[in-house]
Amino acid sequence: MTRAFRTAAVVGAGTIGLSWTALFAAHGLTVRVSDPRPDLDEAVTEALTRYAPHLAARGLDVTGLADRVRIAADVTEAVRDADVVQENGPERAEFKRELFATLTREAPAHALLLSSSSAIPSTAFTAQLPDEAAARVLIGHPFNPPHLLPLVEVVPGARTGEDAVRAAVDFYTSLDRTPVVERVEIPGFVGNRLQNALSREAVSLVQQGVVTPEDLDRIVTDSLGLRWATVGPFLGAHLGGGPGGYRHLVEHIGASMQSLTDGPAPDADAQERLIGAVEKAYGSAPYAELSETRDRRQLAVLDALSETTGTTTPKEEN
């Protein structure tokens, strides 16, 4: 690890901030929480109580969890001695612009400044900061709830320093998260853009009367959701092509899949570059090995789901 993280500040104690608080404390960090909400003390206590069993199930020692969390009177107190700050404020660029001006002024010079922003790149709210301040600000976007879902999108801004990027990756890795660095700033980053694309199509299909909301959810949970829990879209497509891989899939069903979209047909050179990228990622491993790994994971997910059948899906009436 490039630096030590002992004290964390959580600025903003909504759903995401409270989940971060529990995760940080479960990994032994001293956590100071700041939020203007009048019920902050009660909200933190309730979250730690509720999330402790989740964290214990992941093998973490939650003994004395609440003892490692402090309620700060304000942002200044929260960040005063912080090694890392995780901001979880409203999704408004102007709000974040003012807040990060305060954070860079009040936090120690070595503190890593991370934002849980869901869609706003950090360059949008750091433009007025001096270079040395902007160098330690970047996005650390989690998925809800971050104490359970491991992915964190690490997105540096235009002036974020490489040491800050490495430190962010080290920090989230130390929390058993899965940090993925995205080198191009784009609103919504990657995860939410994928989620929004599926959501738009889901809404359209229901509005057209093609399917009901509950049946659309069943379609996802009993097919794509199961697949994506074990392999992503590209590895899934690579395996869908059999031993011929992604290239075989594109050659045989690419045209029919393209007909489902309104956009122009892909440029041949761009298509070849994409195929090459997928083959570079997955082509060196034998098809049988990759598919066996997928199937074992698939069975594990199905077994886990079978233990909770009926707890979330409404039963049909006779």
Image (cartoon, rainbow, N blue to C red):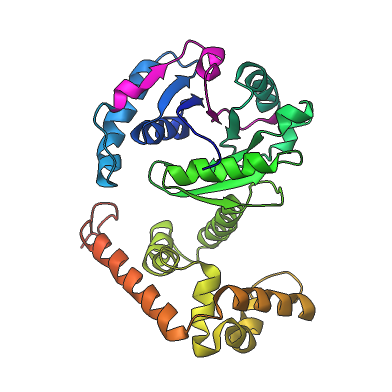
Q: Is residue 259 visible?
A: no
Q: Is residue 241 visible?
A: yes
Question: Residue 113 is drawn in which quadrant?
Answer: top right
Residue stretch in magenta: 65-93
Question: Residue 112 is drawn in which quadrant?
Answer: top right
The x, y position of residue 19, in whole percent, is 40, 35
Seen at 59% across and 34% down, the residue is 115
- Residue 232 vs residue 182, the one in the foreground: 182
The x, y position of residue 57, in whole percent, is 25, 46
Seen at 68% across and 74% down, the residue is 274
- Residue 168 vs residue 222, the one in the foreground: 168
The x, y position of residue 235, in whole percent, is 52, 73
The x, y position of residue 43, in whole percent, is 36, 22
Q: Is residue 235 above or below residue 66?
A: below
Query: On the rendered structure, is 170 left or right of 106?
Result: left
Q: Is residue 126 above or below residue 55?
A: above
